[in-house]
Image (cartoon, grey):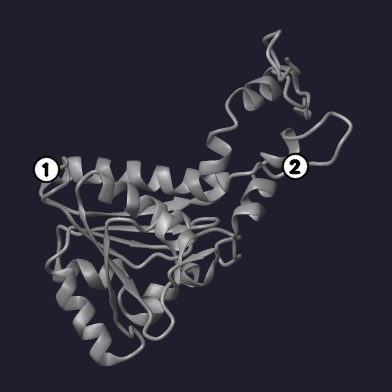
């Protein structure tokens, strides 16, 4: 059954988890996703085990439904080919360190000259501008910096990283939402736009009542184990 995005084509330059999770969601909604990888190297996630018939199960779990091509964007030939592809796609997604795309000569300002309707989403740890823009970010860094680990774990124990990569996955979902919103806006205006997603902003936005409690009381939220800060009984209990 065709999905709602069956007429949308996406050029996916992202790698590892946050960006690929975003584009996988869009693929699940019917979009054609063309994953652009580095020649002879590919997405680093391809090296993550366990493997099934020589293929990374990790990579496959977040890249289903995509097509894959390789282009060397550091060459003039590769850049020229990329700009030709840009004319035929609706969305670009990338999650390189801020400034990388501009250094390669394929940032939004350049790309929109070839395709004014392009929606260009950049996903990074701390956003494209600001004092921390150039800082590298991994999921655990964002979980720690964004406060999630400080409210996760037992009351008398250390901060705990949740079992899932919440920092990456949340950012991927917010990027998906941003792209869907931009596609809707383009239907009205006929114009594309640039989307700047900060993993830290996304992480902070899901702390919900921890923020509310802090602003209401001035007290820093503490770890509560499996208990809830407001409701009771609301925690894990041993059962038969």
Query: Residue 207: percent from the left, percent from the top?
Result: 60, 31
Q: Residues within 10 Å of mark 2 (few under 14, many from 20)?
A: some
Q: Does residue 66 appear to the left or right of 37 in the view shown?
A: left
Residue at 39% from the left image edge and 64% from the top image edge: 14
Q: Which comes before the other along the chain, label 1 or label 2?
A: 2
Query: Residue 103: percent from the left, percent from the top?
Result: 40, 80
Quarter of the image where one finds residue 231: top right
**Residue bearing mark 2:** 160
Viewport quadrant of the C terminus: top right
Whether residue 236 is visible: yes
Viewport quadrant of the N terminus: top left
Quarter of the image where one finds residue 132: bottom right
Residue at 11% from the left image edge and 40% from the top image edge: 188
Q: Residues within 10 Å of mark 1 (few under 14, many from 20)?
A: few
Whether residue 128 is visible: no
Task: Give the CA separation, mark 1 to mark 2.
Answer: 44 Å
**Residue bearing mark 1:** 187
Q: Secondary structure at mark 1?
A: helix
In-front residue for pair 213/109: 213
Residue at 36% from the left image edge and 87% from the top image edge: 74
Q: Nearer the viewer, mark 1 or mark 2?
A: 2
Q: Does residue 214 appear to the left or right of 134 in the view shown?
A: right
Relative to 144, does residue 65 appear above or below in the rendering? below
Across the whole image, how many numbered discs are drawn on residues? 2
Query: Residue 90: percent from the left, percent from the top?
Result: 18, 58
Q: Secondary structure at mark 2?
A: loop
Residue at 49% from the left image edge and 67% from the top image edge: 45
The reply to whether discs 1 and 2 touch (Cβ–Cβ < 8 Å) is no
In-front residue for pair 91/50: 50
Relative to 185, does residue 137 appear above or below in the rendering? below
């Amino acid at each position: 059954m065709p999905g709602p995005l069956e007429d949308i084509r996406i050029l996916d330059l992202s790698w590892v988890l946050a960006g690929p999770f975003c584009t996988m969601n869009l693929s699940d909604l019917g979009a054609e996703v063309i994953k652009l990888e580095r020649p002879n190297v590919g997405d680093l996630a391809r090296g993550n085990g366990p493997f099934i018939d020589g293929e990374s199960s990790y990579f496959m779990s977040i890249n289903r439904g995509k097509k894959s091509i390789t282009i060397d964007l550091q060459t003039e030939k590769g850049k020229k080919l990329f700009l030709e592809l840009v004319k035929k796609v609706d969305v670009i997604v990338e999650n390189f360190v801020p400034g990388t795309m501009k250094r390669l000569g394929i940032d939004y300002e350049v790309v929109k000259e070839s395709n004014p309707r392009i929606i260009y989403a950049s996903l990074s740890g701390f956003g494209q501008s600001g004092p921390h823009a150039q800082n590298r970010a991994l999921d655990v860094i964002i979980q720690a910096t964004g406060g999630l680990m400080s409210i996760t774990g037992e009351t008398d124990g250390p901060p705990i990283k949740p079992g899932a990569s919440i920092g990456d996955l949340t950012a991927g979902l917010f990027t998906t939402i941003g792209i869907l919103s931009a596609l809707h806006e383009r239907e009205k205006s006929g114009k594309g736009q640039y989307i700047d997603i900060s993993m830290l902003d996304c992480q902070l936005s899901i702390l919900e009542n921890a923020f509310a409690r802090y602003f209401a009381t001035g007290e820093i939220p503490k770890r509560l184990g499996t208990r809830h800060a407001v409701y009771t009984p609301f925690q894990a209990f041993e059962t038969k």
